[in-house]
Amino acid sequence: MSRHDLQPKAENPDVVRVTVGWDRPLQTFFAQIFFRTEAEEEGEPLIWHGTEPGELATAEAAIAVVALYADIPGDLADRLTAEMHATAGIKDGRHQAAAKRSLFGSIH
């Protein structure tokens, strides 16, 4: 899995963290936006995409989720795509495969 924490935009003071990355076991990119709450000092992920297999198929799709909330480095899509390609051919371990079968009925 890869993970990139991005700088929240100044015009969004309630956003405390923005994260995008690649989740190899789920074969999806993901995007999280953490907002300041009274209960959670470090923020709560009120926007979270990429929790289902294949949900965000491209780096650009993940970036689109967070673009209004964070400054996006110009090379981020290329880095995320390279991280995805670097995991090509890696198989799930025994425990990952069992978890997928339990959660999704399949390891694909």
Image: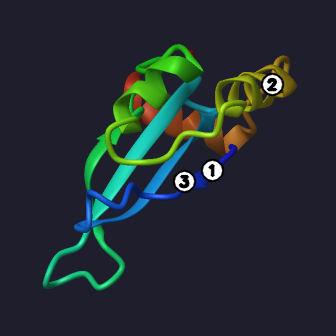
Find numbered disc 1 in the image and state the secondary structure of the residue it sits on.
strand
Q: Residue at x 32, y 38 (%)?
A: 68
Q: Is residue 57 visible?
A: yes
Amino acid, disc 2 = Ala
Amino acid, disc 1 = His
Find numbered disc 2 in the image and state the secondary structure of the residue it sits on.
helix
Q: Residue at x 63, y 50 (%)?
A: 4
Considering every residue shown, the one lying at the far left of the view is: 38
Amino acid, disc 3 = Leu
Frontmost residue, 101 versus 89: 89
Residue at mark 1? 4
Report whether 29 appears left or right of 52: right
Query: Is disc 2 in contact with disc 1, using a CB cutoff of under 8 Å?
Result: no
Find numbered disc 3 in the image and state the secondary structure of the residue it sits on.
strand
Q: Looking at the image, is mark 3 or mark 1 nearer the viewer? A: 3
Q: Is residue 107 visible?
A: no
Query: Is disc 3 in contact with disc 1, using a CB cutoff of under 8 Å?
Result: yes
Report whether 101 appears left or right of 94: left
Query: Is disc 3 in contact with disc 2, using a CB cutoff of under 8 Å?
Result: no
Position of 70 relative to 27 (above/below): below
**Residue 18: horizontal and vertical position, in percent?**
44, 54
Residue at mark 2? 82
Position of 72 relative to 83 (above/below): below
**Residue 86: horizontal and vertical position, in percent?**
86, 26
Q: Earlier in the sequence, mark 3 or mark 2?
A: 3
Question: The C terminus lies in which quarter of the figure?
Answer: top right
Query: Local crowd at mark 2 within 10 Å, few (<14), some, or many (≥20)?
Result: few
Q: Residue at x 53, y 25 (%)?
A: 28
Q: CA distance from mark 3 to mark 2?
A: 18 Å
Residue at mark 3? 6
Q: CA distance from mark 2 to mark 1?
A: 13 Å
Q: Earlier in the sequence, mark 2 or mark 1?
A: 1
